[in-house]
Amino acid sequence: MQFYSTNNSDRFVSVQQALFHSLPVDNGLYMPSVIPRLGADFFNRIATDSLADIGFQVSRELFAGEIPNAALEELTHHAFPFATPVIPLETGKLSILELFHGPSLAFKDVGARYMAGLMSYFSQKGDADVHILVATSGDTGGAVAMGFHDVPGVRVSILYPSGRVSDLQEKQLTTLGGNIQAFEVDGTFDDCQALVKQAFLDSELNARLSLSSANSINIFRLIPQGFYYVSAYGQVAQYRKPVVFSTPSGNFGNLSAGVLVQKMGLPVHHFIAATNANHVVPDYLHSGQYEPKPSVSTISNAMDVGAPSNFVRLTHLYQNSYDDISKHISGYFFDDDQTRAGMQVIHDDFGYVSCPHTAIGILGLQQYLNQTGSDCCGVALATAHPSKFKPLVEEVLGVEVDVPQRLAVLANREKQSIPISCDFNHFREAFLQTV
């Protein structure tokens, strides 16, 4: 498999180049040159397959012999020792795809652990350390920190917006030490993302260091997220209804991953892009006009993105056709008051405790089903464990939320981060002092 830039479809790079040099020099985003098709027989026989089994089978088609099958199988089973179960709320109509059973309790464990495995496989062939730069609005940083912690030959620098992540999210970013370094940015997620992108385009930095990204701008963070859509389909195919996925969305890598596996043959009837007050993509889906805006702070902070990087990938998958994308994806958004009310209704009606991001996914799905009257099997993605937002969830629902031990152990560790401004030169200087 080769990859091309969304800004230049005539120039191709290898798997290894796209993995380690995640942003093309023309500032586009990498896309696979060929999207292999998986036949109906594959989707008809995966009902009992594990996430690791599915990840291996899809990876085998994607890499087509570039990585030995034995290495791929070992990589996927090491990356995914956990499941992504579908939990029915209304049998055959409304279900939750729980993506928080990995080590950092967020869906991004899937992409981060798979990518760490790939980098470890390839880095064994070289001598230089890889320096990963990643911006986070909350969950990405924790997943990347835990996925890459103590991986030989890899150093990680995480940029996060000061005061805009939850306490436990911040602990995940700032307490591991070792090869993990956190930078606390006086700004928004968009500012963090801009610093990372500028670093990848800085010729001197790239001449001195081997820079890569673990954000969803890296195609290999995004590709494995498609595996759990496939797994979810296998779990609900028994209902023999059209399947609709509702994805809480911020940077739109997660939804792009779903569309990618749909292009590989996954029988998805429709997608829902569910956002908070940062609703530039739902606005686009309604009007056809894409107008990025400065992000605003919400209680669903991991989705506080005003200029989603993966919008270009999403539209690219639909040949930049507004008619095509608006046919396959519906957009809904909810403010903080609606999110709080939704969390309460979901708990009252189903006894289910959701984080604010998951609640937005459920609300989007319910709104779609109510508006269309479709007899579908709706699956909302639960992107994070409610304990990651423990104070908010307990305040809204009036119930105690237990913190799993793998997160609770971080609570009393000392935060270690480097405060920086939004100025690139300030970040550049601080970053170089750590390498």
Image: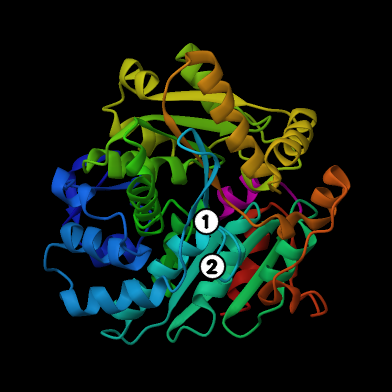
Q: Could you tell me which quadrant the C terminus lies in? A: bottom right
Give the percent coordinates (x, y) of residue 157: 58, 69
What type of secondary structure mainly makes up the magenta span? Answer: helix
* Left or right: residue 316 compared with residue 370: left
Q: Report if residue 306 is visible in the image.
A: no
Give the percent coordinates (x, y) of residue 56: 26, 66
Q: Residue 209 magenta-drawn?
A: no
Q: Residue 194 magenta-drawn?
A: yes
* Left or right: residue 61 compared with residue 370: left
**Contact? badges 1 and 2 (CB < 8 Å):** yes
Q: Looking at the image, is 258 positioned above or below residue 46?
A: above
Amino acid type assigned to the residue bearing label 1 in the image: Leu
Q: Quadrant of residue 225?
A: bottom left
Amino acid type assigned to the residue bearing label 2 in the image: Gly
* Front-lying residue, 28 or 232: 232
Label 1, secondary structure: give it.
loop
* Front-lying residue, 44 or 193: 44
Neighbour class for label 1 at 10 Å: few (<14), some, many (≥20)? many
Give the percent coordinates (x, y) of residue 365: 54, 30
The image's mark for residue 99 is: 1
Residue at (65% x, 57% y) in the render? 385
Label 2, secondary structure: give it.
loop
Q: Looking at the image, is 398 positioned above or below residue 325?
A: below
Neighbour class for label 2 at 10 Å: few (<14), some, many (≥20)? many
Quote the CA–CA distance across marks 1 and 2.
Answer: 8 Å
Which colour style is shown? Answer: rainbow
Residue at (84% x, 58% y) in the render? 400
Residue at (71% x, 77% y) in the render? 175
Q: Quadrant of residue 283?
A: top right
Q: Which stretch is magenta?
A: 186-196
Q: Which residue is mark 2?
A: 102
Q: Report if residue 325 is visible in the image.
A: yes
